[in-house]
Amino acid sequence: MCGIVGYIGNLEKKKLIIGGLRELEYRGYDSAGISVLSQGQLHTFKAVGKLVNLEKKCETFASSGFGVAIGHTRWATHGKPTEANAHPHFADFSNVVHNGIIENHREIKECLEKKGHHFVSQTDTEVIVHLFEEKLKTFTDTFEAFKQTIAELRGAYAILLITQKEPEKIFYAKNASPLIIGKGEDGIFFASSDAPLIGLATDVSYLEDQSVGYMDLNGFESLDLVVKLNQDKGYAQKDGFRFFMEKEIYEQHTVLLESMMGRTNEGKVIFDFRDGQFCDEIEEITICACGTSYHAGMVGKYLLERYGKIKTNVVIASEFRYANPILKKNELFVAISQSGETLDTLEAVKYVKTFGNKTLAICNVDNSSIVRECDEVLLTRAGIEKGVASTKAFATQVMVLWLLSVFLGQRRGVLAPSEAETLIKVMVESAKKTEVSHKLHDRIKRLSKRYLHGHGFFFIGRDVFYPLALESALKLKEISYLHAEGYPSGEMKHGPIALADSELFTVALMPEHLLYEKIKSNVEELSARDATICALSAKEFDGADDMLYISPCSHYMEEFFSMMVALQLFALEVAVRVGSDVDMPRNLAKSVTVE
Ligand code: AGP
């Protein structure tokens, strides 16, 4: 995930900015850069890869006296991780760093190109600094030009801009991406999270959305909501959460919106595939993945068949290659992977390419092996996921597959425009449903103590709730080491019901808006045999021993995302009670590069 730092003051700026970026390294990045403006001169350095590469680039540079500086670590979303795409981006006399996504960057770029602006990167960010310099042709007041620039941007952003026109100021804007301004003995500091500010700033202001302003050495006092900065670094890296996994669960409502950004417009899904005809003539899809990504693929099958009306197969990567698979000529092969390095999935892609089929990666890491191997990519934009047990990566994989299903439905002319429009609205609502309420989390904390023994868990559901049941069972297994299975609820009566007794914990996923009556009778069958039932629903169910209420929803996918969060928290809280290592469970690795 991208990171931002900024500084106004007299300390040596290169050292300070790179030091700040180092505090953000844990968030993951693939390139970095800094700009220092001192004594009227702008100096910019960028490098691909780790910060040591950037340090080498500016080895002989040092700044002295007063100045301003900005820095950035980039996690590629628009354009490859190259030096040209690394921030800061520049125009003639100004530089900018940005976190987030500018949804309307294409329109702005086209318009600026007609006015003679020349762009050197593939990023959405570069338009900001060019637009600002264009505005300065009309508005002589620099801040007015900056405000006018921000007013034209659509999307999420945390922006810092420096310009030779006002060498003592940093201009900033914030909407839906975090930005903090701090003050300490040695000046004014900016960062996208607490960690770089620790030890430097004592007082901070966490900017609100829609903030647009500028800061100089005397401006901090005018800020609202100033608080003392907690100086604990470990706490800061986890944004105050106990575990990375917990932080990642709480981040889902933001990253889900990021995974949609720039991909919908006026009731339509749009993808910027390099080949505009990439999806034409596709008659069937095979999705291939492992673990959690495989479960996302299973959800994708329901959505692709329902909205894209396209036959979809889902295969486990390790089972695929050696089974002499038969692929049709117009079959699209979709590889899903959080890391982009999973060997089973990577080898499956290589194998499929020998047949000449089109390949698409749905991946969280740009420039990873799977991304490089596939013809096209849809990045999930979840940001780095540190918890070994995947949470936000799964959520964004499902969202991207859902977008793909609507995209294909439109492209194939099988989805009515009004339905596509409605589904896009439901996507936004679904993302919002993943915002964790303290009430829900507290309830799950309390409930978890009743589910620490017994002879196993069954998570049951139908349709998309079946792969969610599989995923929830996997989450619980991975971090609490308790035995859990996911099952289609209608299938319990064909065997597993024999296990039912009071020591069998059944977690029943009971959406109001999809097959409620069907799943209800399946759960009643278990309840009648004295299984302990924990039901997840917005609707009260008499046969449950425990109810875990989700908030009322108007669509089954909203229920899907609401339940997903509750089930991730359930696994987390059970794991906390059994005392396992939540972020690094035994025997597991984040990236599995063996067969
Ligand atoms: C998820 O919680 C797991 N750690 C694991 O199942 C993972 O999803 C699987 O190894 C696939 O990884 P990938 O998405 O990086 O390819």
Image (spheres, rainbow, N blue to C red):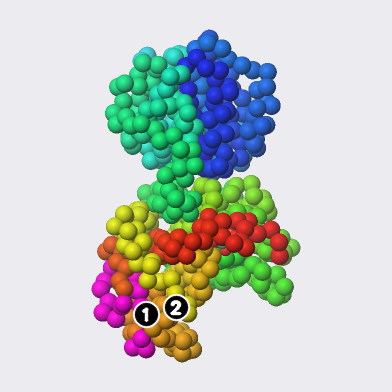
Q: Position of residue 223 (x, y in %)?
A: 31, 25
- Height in image: 439 above or below 452? above
Q: Is residue 543 above or below residue 423?
A: below
Q: Which residue lies at the image location 31% right of the left edge and 78% below the top edge?
A: 544
Residue 497 in view of the camera: yes
Mark 2 vs mark 1, foreground winner is 2
Q: Identify the mark at residue 540; answer none if there is no mark.
A: none
| Chain part drawn in magenta | 528-545
Q: Spatial distance from mark 2 to mark 1, Cα to Cα? A: 10 Å
**Relative horizontal placement of residue 48, taking residue 538 as reference (left or right):** right
Q: State yes or no: discs 2 and 1 in contact (Cβ < 8 Å).
A: yes
- Nearest the eye: 404 or 201: 201
Q: Check disc 2: other Cα within 10 Å, few if <14, some if 14-19, many if 20+.
A: some
Residue located 46% across and 38% down the image = 232
**Residue 117 visible in rendering:** no
> 322 or 387, which is in the foreground?
387
Taking the image in four quarters, ligand 1 sits in the one at bottom right
Locate residue 439, reporting x and y percent. 29, 57
Residue 355 in the magenta stretch? The answer is no
- Determine which quarter of the picture holds residue 329: bottom right
Residue type at tag 2:
Gly
Residue 75: x, y in percent? 56, 41
| Circle on res. 454 | 2
**Quadrant containing the C terminus in the rendered view:** bottom right
Q: Which residue is mark 1?
A: 532
Q: Nearer the viewer, residue 574 or 401?
A: 574
- Amino acid at pointer 1: Thr
Mark nearer the N terminus (2 vs 1): 2
Disc 1 element: strand
Residue at the image position 56 percent from the left and 42 percent from the top: 26
Residue 261 rendering spot, x and y as whole percentages: 44, 46
Q: Main secondary structure of the magenta part?
A: loop
